[in-house]
Image (cartoon, rainbow, N blue to C red):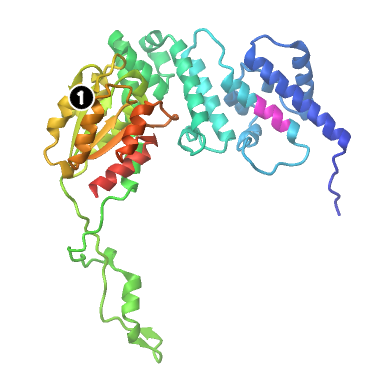
Amino acid sequence: MTETPVTTPEAQSADQTKRQVLYWRLLSRLFSPDEQPSLENASVGIVGELGLPPALLDPGVSVDNLVQRFPELAAQFEGLMTEQEHEEGDEVRRAALVSKLLLNVFATGSGNVSASQLQSWKQDAGWFERGMGCEPGGLRHRVGDEELAKVLAGLEGDLVKRMRLREVLADPALAKQLTPSMSLIEQLLHDKSNLSGVALANAKALIRRFVDEVAEVLRTQVEKASAGVIDRSVPPKRVYRNLDIERTIWKNLTNWSPDDQRLYVDRLFYKRTARRTTPARVIVVVDQSGSMVDAMVNCTILASIFAGLPKVDVHLVAYDTRALDLTPWVSDPFEVLLRTTLGGGTDGTVAMALARPKIADPRNTAMVWISDFYDNRSLITDFEAIHRSGVKFIPVGSVNSSGSQSVDPWYRQKLKAMGTPVLSGHVRKLVFELKNFLA
């Protein structure tokens, strides 16, 4: 019989002191790049007692490199910061590992950033997400973690801005080290007019990769969402895959033979699978100011996916102080993004003047208006008129993957009172709204 070890009050007090030392060192390094010798020496001693490698304390060593050199640590980082039972007396080890994750992700320093440094940070951010209990990139999709996802996106955006992007793009070897992300794509879209030659070609390749990756995710979400209501006026197709087994058995129960212990089926029943489809028009109006880049990218790609559905006529309008009809390129979000110019002023009235004539059959039209709505307040009159006409009006303040977006409180209140509250959050919400309209 083995005895369960009992942790004495003295040992608990000593462990608490060690954790405090590790966390005080973490705070010190987060707010100042200068080392505090006493905290550093004490932390080295604690890590040594735990049998952990000294590299754990070196912010210059990425978590990825650490795990490559010490593979046994990989499992210890997984789910490290989730609510789960941990072995008694393990708190100090957890404090050391958590400190490593937090230091590498949140102490981003200052000055210029290389492509390899950005890539290393993104890998560390992936380990941080594993520590939070999700796959790399999954934190931004998890309900309740929007603010943390927004902080990570902000850190990445700052690193991208500090990188000499034009020089990196001009060097094919350095450009290969870049992996597309929303922050990087935003910077590329802002700077594309200043690029040429090899740099422009590499920028386009990164944008194309990002568009394809996001499109694959969004296409899956569109396919999973309900695709319309069953049309019961259409007789069921009498093929095996439509056979309704449960109903067939139920309707033939009177044919059960106790002697033979068999159910004799004299009538088969089939499921109806035909769905009602009505030609529909979707008009997507996108504010292309810099603050809306995440929503703009997601919704531009989403528009292209819906444009590929049968009997759906999608129109796309982008605007700042001028409006641009991008409908000819709606099926290719890559081309759309290359034709947008982020930043500048905002005047939704010019977009309304271009979009409103596209409404031919109000009851069969949806208008998706994507903006932060810091705009001309006379637009509310147009929104109300369109809504009254029977158009399905869907105002979108933020449909993205990195957190909440600021929306003009005046417009938010007015649109809610109109019965069309501003949609914000994950792009799945917009997919759901559009699929319901098309049903």
Give the residue furthest to the bottom: 259
Q: Report crowding for label 1: few under 14, some 14 to 19, many 20 or more residues within 10 A (C-alpha).
A: many
- Check disc 1 and report its element: helix, strand or loop: helix
How many discs appear?
Answer: 1
Horizontal side of residue 151 vs 38, given as left or right: left
Magenta: main secondary structure equals helix
From where the camera sits, is residue 335 visible? no
For residue 201, above or below residue 248: above
| Residue type marked 1 | Ala
Horizontal side of residue 56 vs 239, given as left or right: right
Q: Magenta region: which residues? A: 93-99
For residue 97, above or below residue 89: above
Q: What residue sits 35% from the left and 72% below the top?
A: 246
Residue 24 position within the rendered picture, expressed as x and y whole percent measured from the top left? 72, 20
Tag 1 residue: 351
Question: In the rendered image, which quarter is residue 407 located in?
Answer: top left
Q: Of residues 18 and 264, which is closer to you in this image? A: 18
Q: Of residues 372 and 236, which is closer to you in this image? A: 372
Q: Of residues 45 and 22, which is closer to you in this image? A: 22
Residue 118 position within the rendered picture, expressed as x and y whole percent measured from the top left? 49, 18
Q: What residue sits 30% from the left and 8% below the top?
A: 194
Residue 97 magenta: yes
Residue 309 position within the rendered picture, expressed as x and y whole percent measured from the top left? 21, 43
Horizontal side of residue 407 vs 65, given as left or right: left
Residue 106 magenta: no
For residue 437, above or below residue 267: above
- Image quadrant where one finds the N terminus: bottom right
Residue 83 position within the rendered picture, expressed as x and y whole percent measured from the top left? 63, 41
Question: In the rendered image, which quarter is residue 366 located in?
Answer: top left
From where the camera sits, is residue 319 visible? yes
